[in-house]
Image (cartoon, grey):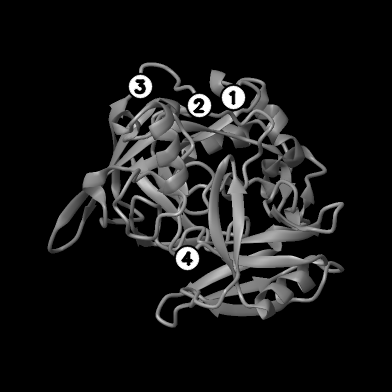
Amino acid sequence: MKVEKIYVYPVKALRAVEVNDSIVTKHGFPYDRRFMLVHVDRDKDGSTIYKNIHVAHYPESIFFHPSLDTKADLIRIDFKPPEGRGEKQTLDFPLKPVTEDLEIIPIKMHLSEVHAYKMPQQYSDWFTSCYGFEVALVYLGPNYRPTRMSQTPIASKQPSGWLSSITSTASSYLPFGSKELSKELLTFNDCAPYLVCSSKSMEDVAARISSDKENLDIIKFRPNIIVSGAEKAWDEDFWSQITITSSSNSSSSQTRIECIHNCGRCKSINIDYTTGKPGEKESGEVLKKLQRDRRVDVGMKYSPIFGRYSFLNDDSEGNLINVGDEVVVSRRNGEHTKFGEFSFTGIERDD
């Protein structure tokens, strides 16, 4: 098998950036989901509330196309709406903002909390003009969110009971680079630093649709690493660990990815990426078609499964992986895994 594609999502819920290679870290790819957008709303008492923007409920997010200029330390966002949905616009903002004078706000995702920085108002105003309602651009900065799963690569090493609860809470306020407490910390990813998908399984998804195939793309499933060459569709359900071998003229490295949990799917995969609305033809029925036989995880029995939530093995920190690298399944599970501590029942992916 091979690494077919590598995707980074600089701003959560917006389009992906395809890259040829990337450093891997225990927190994900270096520029993956370190920014996100929130809908600034008001509660009945007039207080401000922040609603996380994600594709399922804010499908117009797919009109925003990011690109990275790492030499200039910039992110560029091109807003490309269809005719009648606004004017094309472009925004640049720093990849590594100075946070000293920025307002700090709480962000909560899937029972996991973190403090984030509101970017300067001109950036939020730009997104507000595109969306048509008040939006704020926020930056994770040096903070990370705790992983809310009972099973992670180091879960067995964690204390139990009340001490475990304290540890999880404290972890959400750890600065970047801290090695204290749990190492299983996230950016604005949903549940794990990496999502691994198989292109062979995507072929099975496409085979379920007789027409409207042009609106079906694996990018709707928001993968980080796409693996090609699997022997059969859905073989990744049983992957426990994959090893990626990278070779160059001077050296080679082996990157071990721990495939821990299944990824349950929501209505975001029904969005037509040309219109920013639910698909009107078969591409708008992908979730329904997968529900027929892909509800294979008893931990989220109502959600069809596609992809594996994955973590980096400690011995692979800082390795470089490339498109075209060899991939082998270095450990298998004998049966389907069960989603961890909390379930996605009634919870939709934010990616």
Camera-side mark, 4 or 1: 4
Circles 4, 1 touching at the beta carbon (< 8 Å) = no
| Residue 54 located left or right of residue 164 | right
Task: Verify CB contact (< 8 Å) between mark 4 and mark 3.
Answer: no
Residue 172 location in percent, x, y?
47, 50
Q: Are marks 1 and 2 in contact (CB under 8 Å)?
A: yes
Identified by mark 4, the residue type is Gly
Vertical arrangement, residue 306 with respect to residue 300, above or below: below
Q: CA distance from mark 4 to mark 3?
A: 36 Å
Q: Dot 4, how many residues are within 10 Å of its Cα: few (below 14), some (14-19), or many (20+)?
A: some
Task: Please name the amino acid that badge 3 sits on.
Answer: Asn
Q: Which residue is mark 2?
A: 339
The amino acid beneath tag 2 is Phe
Q: Find residue 300 and report its image quarter.
A: top right
Q: Is residue 209 left or right of residue 197?
A: right
Judge whether 282 appears above or below 123 on screen: above
Q: CA distance from mark 1 to mark 2?
A: 7 Å
Q: CA distance from mark 1 to mark 3?
A: 18 Å
Marker disc for residue 141: 4
